[in-house]
């Protein structure tokens, strides 16, 4: 897929399926509102018990169609060995310079999965490096304006978001995208107990209930969020 000249938002995921799990509905909603959205998977996500690199590529392509076919790429960093090294930071900063996203979405900064923690640190560091002049990073210096954090965590916690976004109209398509990852989210789920997709649906239903809609996705921010008005509040 050709690189866009600039993106309104870039979702960075440690593994294929994390973007869909954490904010698949929001990706759909933003695209339908006219935003240019991209997804960058940092690793192949393999090896896994039922998966393969080829399987995950096919699953990702199918899931991406359910998300509205945003620009998507894979940085090819090592799964299970993802680290915020200088080499990886440079590679990610170069992507930021190529696709010039105004807004970044990163995994929440607390997690039990080492790859997720490393991804968050890597994204924050690469965002800073992307703006540096007099460096050997390819491309023109560029600084994404803000990072927001989505929840695709391996901790049994109740999220404490800065805001939640209504995805009631996008909920079913988000679930359809998740079902595309059969090797990860369908065929390997325990019998007689709720699986990952069930859990995701319950969480979006909970946050929807909190704000008075059917389904919503939570997001966090390390920094205050500026508003131009209160018209978007669901009171």
Image (cartoon, helix red, strand yellow):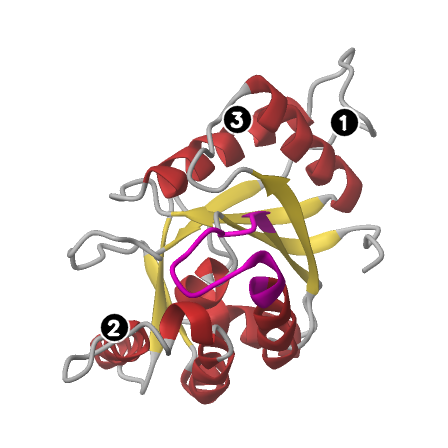
Question: What x and y, as percent, mark residue 209?
Answer: 22, 81
Residue 167 seen in the current view: yes
Residue 230 seen in the current view: no
Residue 141: mark: 1
Give the residue at mark 3: 125
Left or right relative to 178: residue 94:
right
What is the quadrant of residue 230 in the picture? bottom left
Residue 13 versus residue 90 in the image, above or below: below
Which residue is at a point 37% across and 77% down the rendered structure image? Answer: 187
Q: Which structural element holds mark 3?
A: helix
Residue 27 versus residue 120 in the image, above or below: below
Which residue is at a point 59% across and 81% down the rendered structure image? Answer: 66
Q: Which residues are magenta?
A: 41-56
Q: Quadrant of the C terminus?
A: bottom left
**Distance between mark 2 and mark 3 Cα atoms:** 30 Å
| For marks 2 and 3 on the same chain, the one whose residue lies earlier in the sequence | 3
| For marks 1 and 2 on the same chain, the one whose residue lies earlier in the sequence | 1
Closer to us: 143 or 68 = 68
Left or right relative to 194: residue 137:
right
Q: Residue furthest top?
A: 134
Give the residue at mark 2: 203
* Magenta-drawn stretch contains 153: no
Which residue is at a point 41% across and 33% down the rendered structure image? Answer: 118
**Distance between mark 1 and mark 2 Cα atoms:** 39 Å
């Amino acid at each position: 897929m050709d690189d866009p000249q600039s993106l309104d938002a870039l979702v960075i995921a440690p593994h294929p399926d994390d973007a869909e799990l954490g904010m698949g509905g929001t990706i759909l909603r933003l695209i339908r509102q006219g935003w240019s959205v991209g997804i960058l998977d940092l690793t192949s996500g393999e090896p896994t018990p039922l998966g393969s690199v080829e399987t995950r590529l096919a699953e990702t392509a199918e899931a991406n169609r359910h998300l509205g076919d945003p620009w998507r790429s894979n940085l090819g960093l090592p799964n299970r060995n993802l680290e915020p090294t200088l080499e990886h930071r440079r590679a990610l900063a170069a992507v930021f310079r190529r696709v010039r996203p105004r807004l970044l979405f990163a995994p929440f900064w607390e997690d039990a999965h080492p790859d997720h923690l490393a991804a968050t640190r890597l994204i924050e560091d690469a965002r800073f490096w992307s703006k540096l002049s007099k460096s050997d990073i390819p491309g023109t210096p560029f600084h994404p304006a803000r990072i927001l954090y989505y929840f695709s965590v391996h901790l049994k916690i109740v999220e404490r978001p800065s805001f939640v976004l209504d995805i009631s109209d996008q909920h079913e398509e988000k679930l359809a995208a998740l079902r595309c990852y059969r090797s990860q989210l369908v065929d390997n789920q325990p019998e007689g107990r709720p699986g990952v997709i069930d859990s995701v649906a319950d969480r979006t239903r909970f946050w929807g209930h909190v704000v008075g809609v059917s389904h919503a996705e939570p997001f966090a921010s390390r920094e205050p969020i500026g508003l131009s008005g209160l018209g978007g509040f669901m009171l």
